[in-house]
Amino acid sequence: MFEIEIDGKIVNANPGENLITVTDREGISVPRFCYHNKLSVSANCRMCLVDVEGATKPQPACSTPVSNGMRVSTKNDKAKSSQKAVMEFLLINHPLDCPICDQGGECELQDVAMSYSSDVSRFNEGKRVIADSDIGPLIQTDMTRCIHCTRCVRFGAEIAGIMEMGGTGRGDSLKIEPFLQEGIQSELSGNMIDLCPVGALTSKPFRYELRSWQMNAVEGIARHDSVGSNIHIQTYKGKVKRVVARNNDNINETWISDRDRFSCDGLNHENRLQKPQIKYDGVWKETEWDTALVYSTKALLREVIDNKEESKLGALASNNATLEEYYLLRKLLKQVGSDNTDYRLNIKDLSNTINLDSNIKIKDIENIDYALLVGSYTRLEQPMINHRLRKSSLNGATIDVINSMSFNYNLPINSEYILNSSQIANLLARTLKAILLSKEQEIPGYLDKFKVSDADTQLANKLLSSDKSAIILGEHLINSDNSSNIANLISIIAEKTSSSTLNLSETGNSIAAKSTGFVPNENGLDANEMLASKMNAYILLDVYPKYDFHNSVSAINALRDEKTFVIALNSFKDSDVFDYADVILPISSYYETSGTHTNVEGEMQSFSAAVGSPKDIKPAWKVLKVLADLLDLSGFNYTDSSKVTSEAKQQIKQNIEHDREINLINTKGVEIIWQPSPYSTDALLRHSNSLQATKIGQLNTASMSASTAKSLKLSDTDNYLGVPVVISEVVADKCVFISSSNETISEKIS
Ligand code: SF4
Ligand code: FES
């Protein structure tokens, strides 16, 4: 540990640290523009110049390493005059457009100028003007304001992993601009808005809406994936206006995905359901809450309870509900006498599901030295997990990938196996056999038929020799015939090689659903069994059949059955809800309700409502509570959702035991692998116009190899399952990889 003196104060510093790290830790203010603690040091703005004893010139605090006995002044005349001189240079070309700049009130240049600049400019020449580029629907550019700090450039190169912004020209002609005509494509692009210290990059959907000081900021949790990024929800007069990142080094550091940042756009969409509605004699009528709830209660009594047909009541929920909502709905059904609850709506065969526990902390992903990624395009599935994985690869980790299609990863991939699901299962089986042979352990019968090759042994050796390896399973294989085999093989391989596992087929708040027991026990029916049975009544919690079910046609037909009474709790009317429901109860959407999200590492993060729900819209937990009260069920007298949380937490089930039986199956015919657009995985995202306008939001391809296309009698001018065919040799044979937000796809998959 070094001792150094800063502004007359003796402080400790770690060898190798830069001065600015020490001043920040000690609360000594040093102005800066290019420095950011999560980016590399570029030291190009010179705003942080300080006086270091013995140095002839002022030194940039951000790039000057500490040395023992160093004496530094951040505020003497030499330091101050240098800082003021830099400020004067930076303002030479900066426009005086603060009154119309969206960064006003949160502009680092404006703040620093208050202390380090003069109110009179000595620069009388014309200012430089830079033409703006349209870089997409999320980020507004005003590049005349750019001060060339290069934070956005370094963000692309170091964090997003796609070099999209760069500097061209020199001196007065230096411009920061996107390299590519199509603009910014990164799934993390919105972080550049937070990073830009001036108003050169601002939020396009939020443009000219409000000043930052007019808004309240409420701490929240993003629920679009199983990371649970920490966010600030900025509100004004009861409306969510903007979402920005909130620092949590264990989860999302200082970044959030575009999905988490821009989804709030959808909250005020015209498709929001505004009032309860009941279908009376085949005609929909808006009504009051009391009437709708009594109507629902009477129907449940009539269809289920009075005639003792409790087992004919089912509850289906999306995977984005809160832990409290899952708990209450499960409790309600249980008390009525039904065990039919499920959230796994997109699984073709629920007897063949992925059961794989995750046992690695999100922050530890960046410290692994080897990762085997199976059936996942982490960039689009879980962008913040991908960020940690990218960090691990930059730290030297080796990443091998086993997928049915090759993707545009933003991290170096060591080797890539492009295989169909049977081949993936077989590769994992041979790898397991190689591991057992190497450990001289007994080989189970199901591995007898496999012959281990040198490549299998190499893969096994990587897992065996690594100190901190992880096997990551994604969502591509959820509907493969071998999905449970693959998950079980991964689980056994991880155990034999002391590897960690990470199950990214868990999405939204599905871990909370599982932990509250929102899956049927041995007495209950699963989602597919319910749809195949004639149920008397359903309670649907935030379910949108056209998007959520594996087979939306049969789901909608089952719900539409005249003899089935459907109570639909929804926020949006983006499905056929008026076709199949009998009562529609409009519920609060994201940020309008309190609750708890459980992330992939098991961290339960509770959040409060950032805004109240619009008039006549109620939080789902309250709706379920009142429904239970009207049904005369006991134990529902909660005064607020935190009471539900504490009760639910006492009954949480963790790491539910499941068998690891393996029975490998050879897939026949063409396999369809469906990855929905990351901006269509829930109703709020589907209603965010800004996200839908991005390239990622418009993904719409059915990729297949030439031989698969030939076997399906298709060419690249055709559509397959409603999606344009793309012939590509990076897709495994006999596989069709569909990336789309198109609701009609699932209608055609049976
Ligand atoms: S656009 Fe903003 S972040 Fe990028 S270099 Fe200019 S000032 Fe810095
Ligand atoms: S912050 Fe140190 S040179 Fe820019």
Image (cartoon, helix red, strand yellow):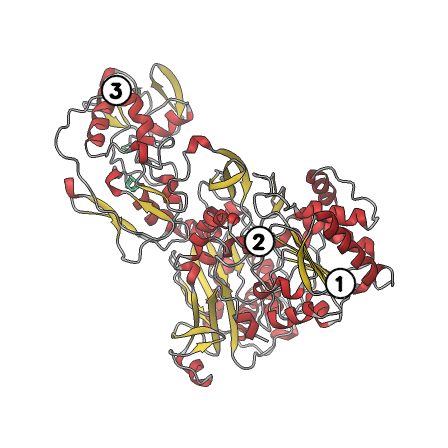
Disc 1 and disc 2: Cα gap in Å? 26 Å
Q: Point out residue 33 in the picture as x, y percentages from the top left corner.
A: 30, 33
The response on whether ligand 1 sits within 8 Å of label 1 is no
How many other residues sit within 10 Å of disc 1, few (<14), some (14-19) or many (≥20)?
Answer: many
In the picture of the structure, the residue carrying the numbered disc 3 is 80
Look at the numbered discs 3 and 1 and tell me whether their residues touch, using CB distance below 8 Å: no
Q: Nearer the viewer, mark 2 or mark 3?
A: 2
Residue 495 in view (yes/no)? yes
Q: Are marks 2 and 3 in contact (CB under 8 Å)?
A: no
> Residue at (51%, 39%) from the top-left corner?
233
- Mark 2 nearby-residue class (10 Å; few <14, some 14–19, many ≥20): many
Amino acid type, residue under disc 3 in the picture:
Lys
Residue at 55% across, 65% down: 435
Where 526 sits versus 590, above or below?
below
Name the residue beneath numbered marker 2: 508
Residue 681 image position (x, y, % from top left):
53, 58
SS for callout 1: strand
Residue type, mark 2 in image: Gly
Q: Which residue is mark 1?
A: 537
